[in-house]
Amino acid sequence: MMNTRFTNAKILCTNSDQSFDIIKGELWVENDRIAYIGDGTDAPQKEGMNWDRTIDVNGDLLMPGFKNAHAHTYMTFLRSYADDLPLQEWLYNLCFPMEDKLDTENIRPFEVLGIMEYLTSGITTSFDMCYFPPVYAQVATECGFRAVQVSGVNSFGGLASVVEENYHKVNETSDLTSFMIGFHAEYTTKPELMKEIADLAHKYKTPLYMHNSETRREVDECLERYGKTPTQLTDELDMYAYGGGGYHCIWFDERDFEIFAKRDLTAVTCPASNLKLASGIAPLKEFTDRGINVAIGTDGAASNNALDMFREMYLAATLAKVREEDAACIPAEKILYMATAGGAKAMALPDCDRLAVGKKADLIRIDLTQPNMQPENNLVTNLVYAGGKQNVVMTMVDGKILYENGKFSIGMEPEDVYRDVNAIIRSMKD
């Protein structure tokens, strides 16, 4: 573990009312946690304090890392492979057949590739629905990346017993990895399996997540089958006794909103993926007006195709304005909160939600000297409306710098990863 001192910094501090303050001064990291934030005049005098590294950030911004609240990291293998198709055709005709070719070895380089892209975008945690969850837990641990996972089981051969096995394996892998109970979606999962998954959530007192109301067709067909929406069906199965939420959450009715508010659930919006698959625009203003937690995710590279939280923030903010025909419906501060603390709440990571003494040292450095971040009229709105991946010059996870000035410190070289992923893709297509 390392002790790192950041000096001459602007530091983005998150308030309980979802607003932000910026202070000037220092931030200290001891091992994996933040030990001090302030102007330096009240810094504790610690006997024998040895800094492994002191970094003068030269007036740049230190802020909480982004939390990618819905991801399929392994899906980098399908980037630009199945584009310009509606969701059902995209998923069943192209994605699922290729996913059948994945195994516990050939999936690894694609997961590393995804983690690399996350780091360049300032993402310090992903909330994944993965194939072979124990493998991704191992890969993330080896890279030093924080990864929360949820089961993506469905009725195409999936078993609740395997979900339970993965729950234990992932949660025991390292402090960087955790696992929640869940399933892929109502339209891929039979009632008997959904009931077994609900029982597991009760047994282990875990939040539960699934793809929920992503398309109008999904909701209409669920209503035909059960006379209920996916939210109402899963609530009646008592899946949310310990919280959770849903991914996408576009086609909600009044009762769905009421359930999410009553159960304190999280709606995870994935605007780029939803646009590309023509799924719709999530009702973010309705969620926020009702006090429902909202987080932001990229979804997978097969449906996005980038893993870029700056683009997601911009789209989340601007699409909400178009949907409501109201340019003031959601301020930039709320969007930035969704991308940081909102995601941490979704993933049950209270120690990773903000920069504060005692919190985990999951933080990023934003280069403010580039043209798109000037002038500094409002740094928060700059981040949401003008910021980009080019502004991320450092990403720290758990007190370790994994990405800095274009260089990765994850235990492997980029050229090796690129060589491996292209070789595997060629073999899959043969």
Image (cartoon, rainbow, N blue to C red):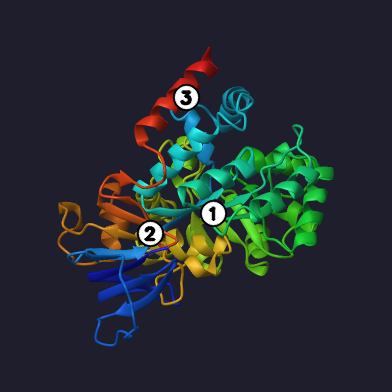
Q: Amino acid at mark 2?
A: Asp
Q: Nearer the viewer, residue 255 or 303?
A: 303
Query: On the picture, is 2 further left or further right than 201?
Result: left
Q: What residue is drawn where x is 67% and y is 66%?
A: 263
- In this figure, which residue is indicated by the disc labeled 3? 81
Front of the two marks 3 and 1: 3
- In this figure, which residue is indicated by the disc labeled 1? 268
Q: What residue is drawn where x is 45% and y is 30%?
A: 79
Percent x, y of residue 332: 35, 63
- In this figure, which residue is indicated by the disc labeled 2? 326
Percent x, y of residue 109: 48, 33
**Does 422 sit above or below residue 401?**
above
Query: On the picture, is 286 further left or further right than 202?
Result: left
Q: Nearer the viewer, residue 23 or 398?
A: 398
Dot 2 or dot 3, earlier in sequence: 3
Quadrant containing the N terminus is: bottom left
Q: Amino acid at mark 3?
A: Tyr
Percent x, y of residue 55: 24, 64
